[in-house]
Image: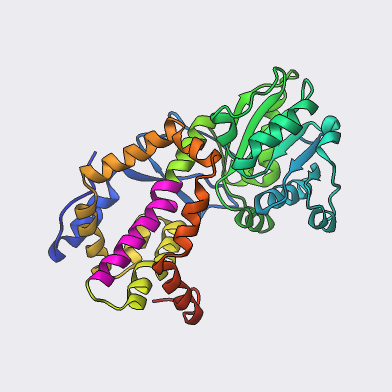
Amino acid sequence: MQDCFITVNEGQIKTARESFANCRFSYASISNEHNRNHAYMVNSQDMSADNLTILKGDEVPIDGLLGKRVLLVGYGNQGAAHAKNMRESGIDVSICTRQTEQPIADGFQVFPIEESGGFDLIIIALPDDVQESFITEKLIPQLTQGITVGFIHGFTVHYNLCEFPEGVGVVMVAPKGPGKTLRDTYKAGKGIPSLMAVHQENAEHTARPIALGWAAGLGSNRAGVIETTFKDETETDLFGEQTIIVGGMLALMKASYETLVEAGYPKHLAYIECCHEVKQVADLVYEQGIAHMLEAISDTAELGAYTAIDELDDDTLRTKLRNILTYIQEGTFASDMINQKIKHMRDDFRASEIEQIGEEIRSFMPKDTDG
C-alpha cells in the first residue's frame, strides 16, 4: 500500500492529492436510504468487510425489546436521548435517577433501583468513575436470572471493575456521537451508527435480541450497527480521545500557540490561528471526509498540510502513540481514572494562559464564522 506521508512542493500538489487519496485510509459508508450522505473513515487493513460486521435495517429488529420493560439509570445528555428515542420507537422506558424533576417533566416514570426487579433491561448511563460503586453496592443485589444489564461504553466491564452473576446478560450499545446528535438525527428520521457487543448471555438467551432491539430503538438501524467487543470499543474509544479527538488536538493547539507566542507574535492572533479555527476544518472532515476537506481549503493550506504531515509524523510520534495505547491496554489509565487523577489536571489547565486568551477571543469573535 502506498505511503501517504510524502514531501511535496507547489509543482507537486496534484500528485500529492492523488497519493493521499490512495494511502492507508479508505471510506466506508455505513448509511442507508435515510442517511446516504454520511461516510465514516476506517482503516481498510483493520476494519475491512471481511472482519467487520455491519447490520442495517431489518438485520437490527426491534422485536427483542418490544413488550419488555427498560430501566435507564442516569438522565444526562446521553441517557435522556436514549430514553426519548426508545420511547418514541414504542419501547417501555422508565428512569432511575436521584434528580427526578426533569425525567418526570419529560413524561417518564421514575423508580428507585431497589424496585428494578420487574425490568428486563437495565441500562447504565452513569459516568465511568461512579459506575463501580453503584453497580457493586446497589445494582447487583437486585439482579435475578434472565435480566440483562446494558452499557453505553465498555469501560467498567472491560476493566473488570464489576463481576456479574451467571445468568445475567451483559451487553453494550454505544452510539458514535453525543446525546444531542443521537436525538437530533432520530427526530430528523435518520440515525447514527452504534457499536454493539454481547459480553455475557442471560439465562433465557435473550441478551442479543434485547441489544439489537435497543439499537433499533435508538435509530441506529437506519445508519448501521457495528458488532464488536467490549475490549475493542473501550480501547479504541479511549485511544481516539487521547491521541486526536481531545488529547492530541489540545497538545498540538497548545504547542503551536506557545511556539508563535515565543516567536514574538501577538497572543490573540496566535490563539485565533491555532485554536479558534479548528472547528471549521473539523466540520469539513465530519461532513464529507478528509479528501473533501483538502479540496475545500486553499491550495496554500493544502500544500502546507502535506509538508507538515511529512515533518510531524516520524518514528518519535509513532512511539508516543504506541505508548499511549499501551497505557490504555495495560489498565494504567483506568487506574488513574478511578483514583481521580483528573482533578488537579483540570484545575491546572483552567488556569493556563491559553485558556484565558481563549475566553477573551470568544467574547468578541462570532461563532461559526467562515474564513
Looking at this view, is 240 or 361 the one in front? 361
Q: Position of residue 104 (x, y in %)?
A: 84, 54
Indicate whether 90 appears above or below 368: above
Looking at this view, is 223 or 76 the one in front? 76
Image label count: 0
Q: Is residue 221 left or right of residue 346?
A: right
Indicate whether 318 appears above or below 259: above
Q: Is residue 343 left or right of residue 94?
A: left
**Quadrant of the image for the C terminus?**
bottom left
In terms of image quadrants, where is residue 161?
top right
Looking at this view, is 135 or 50 the one in front? 135
- Magenta segment includes 201: no
Q: Position of residue 297 (x, y in %)?
A: 33, 68
Q: Position of residue 311 (x, y in %)?
A: 19, 54
Give me the residue at 57% from left, 27% from top: 160
Tell me which segment is drawn in magenta: 241-262
In terms of image quadrants, where is residue 51?
top left
Magenta stretch: helix, strand or loop mostly: helix
**Quadrant of the image for the N terminus?**
top left
Q: Position of residue 133 (x, y in %)?
A: 67, 35
Give me the residue at 48% from left, 82% from top: 364
Q: Is residue 190 left or right of residue 47?
A: right
Give me the residue at 79% from left, 57% from top: 102
- Magenta segment includes 249: yes
Any part of residue 267 in sight: yes
Any part of residue 49 in sight: no
Q: Colour scheme in the image?
A: rainbow
Q: Residue furthest bottom?
A: 364
